[in-house]
Amino acid sequence: MRELNLNDVTKAVKSLAIDACYNLNDDVLNCIKCYKDKETSELGKSVLEKIIENDELAKRDSLPMCQDTGVAVVFVEIGNQVIFNGNIEDAINQGIREAYTEGYLRKSVVSHPFNRINTIDNTPAIIHYKITEGESVKITVAPKGGGSENVSLVKMLIPADGIEGVKKLVLDTVFNAGGKPCPPIIIGLGIGGNLEKSALLAKEALMRDIDDENKDPILNKLEKELLSEVNKLGIGPMGFGGNTTALAVKINSYPCHIASLPVAINIQCHASRHKSIIL
Amino acid sequence: MIYKLHTPIQGKDIAKLHIGDIVLISGTIYTARDAAHKRLVELIKSNQELPLELKDAIIYYVGPTPAKPNQAIGSAGPTSSYRMDPYVKDIMEKGSIISIGKGPRANYVKDLIKEHKGLYLSTIGGAAAAIGKTVIKRELIAYPDLGAEAIQKLEVKDFYAIVTYDSYGEDLFTKGIEDFRKKQN
Ligand code: SF4
């Protein structure tokens, strides 16, 4: 057994949240650069240039790349040999509180969907726990903006819809979202499981590296086909037209009921922020 | 085309602008997003005094991050404009005919903009750190309790925006996709 001090969890969460908001991961930044060279619309290309300039400026001057520093989504994988000296949920929320107040991040959480009073410190985080084997704890902090989350959805397809049904749903959803989620986007798909499992799978798919190859041959092919079809929609950077609508499609899947084909589409904007640490 | 404009932006300048044009605005603009719009429209509907003069005011849909000690404002990119669509008729009738945000809006907004000979401009979503640098002064005008959603008066210099709906009823989002499809064929 290993006892983990919760102060270390708080510290880790705080620095991951700030780091995520200031420093776009290189896989995404390089991918945007690559697409900029291939963009056929002049305005689209200049939008991508401005996004790259912004992300480099944010890194250099330690500033949030986007003003919507989101709701903090936190994934925690806890080894079964780890014990904590207190309440881990409080420790995580304390890290978020400190990051958003001391890191000059925007507080975008309201305490109730209808009274809409700001909680002032961006807590509570949305936390997903998983028990793994061993003595370590992996924490991922992923601030998620509202613009791209608002155009995400879960749809319960039926088995007869199959791959074609999934493709149609994705293409329709991305087309209807148009410029709203700040394209270029990354599309996280959760296919299978049930209603809530598919949504979580889609969010987890967004945590993968942008150039990560899917090991499932069916899903690997579907990721590539969908990316190419989405980029033929013509939405382009910020919706002004062009061939760069999405940077990647990432699919995670899970077994499901004989009657169901759940599909969750989690749209992520180009400000794709997530950072991890192993304690 | 790129145009350098000073506020208040005159009707003759608005008439020159077409979708896809780039404007570099210098002067005064005001921030307001969901919660502030709700309050403003409640005041308008009940004939009460407004905390700012809406005539000729340019409204930027933004909720910035807090300013660091050496900054006028933090990161300040646009938020999705369609969420302000339900309020825009009342706001435009008070004389604020230019708005800045991001993303497509309802068709009735396009019609309202044509009717009032106004503009809907977009800045680049997510390019917030760079946009923040073009704000040189910030003054709180109303609703500090709303935090990032308070109404603030911004002095901007060469603030970059793209004409997305012009005063002739044209729409860059639709045209951008059409142009792309033409190129494909
Ligand atoms: S969709 Fe993403 S890039 Fe656009 S404003 Fe929201 S968080 Fe920022």
Image: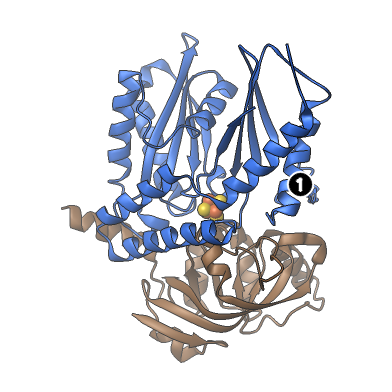
Chain colours: A blue, B brown
Q: Residue furthest front?
A: A2
Residue for point 64% across, 33% down: A74
Q: Residue furthest top?
A: A258
Identify the element where label 1 is drawn: helix
- Above or below — where is A23 with respect to A50? above
Q: How many numbered marks does the figure carry?
A: 1
Q: Nearer the viewer, residue A276 or A217?
A: A276
Q: Position of residue B58 (x, y in %)?
A: 59, 78
Q: Where is residue A86 in the image (x, y as percent from the top left)?
A: 84, 24
Residue for point 60% across, 63% down: B75
Q: Nearer the viewer, residue A3 or A88?
A: A3
Q: Nearer the viewer, residue B62 or B135?
A: B135
For residue A275, what is the image quadrant? Answer: top right
Which residue is label 1 attached to? A98
Q: Where is residue A109 in the image (x, y as percent from the top left)?
A: 73, 47
Mark 1 residue type: Glu
Task: Tell me if the residue at label 1 has its CB under 8 Å from ligand 1.
Answer: no
Q: Can see residue A223?
A: yes
Classify residue A14 as left or right of residue A198.
right
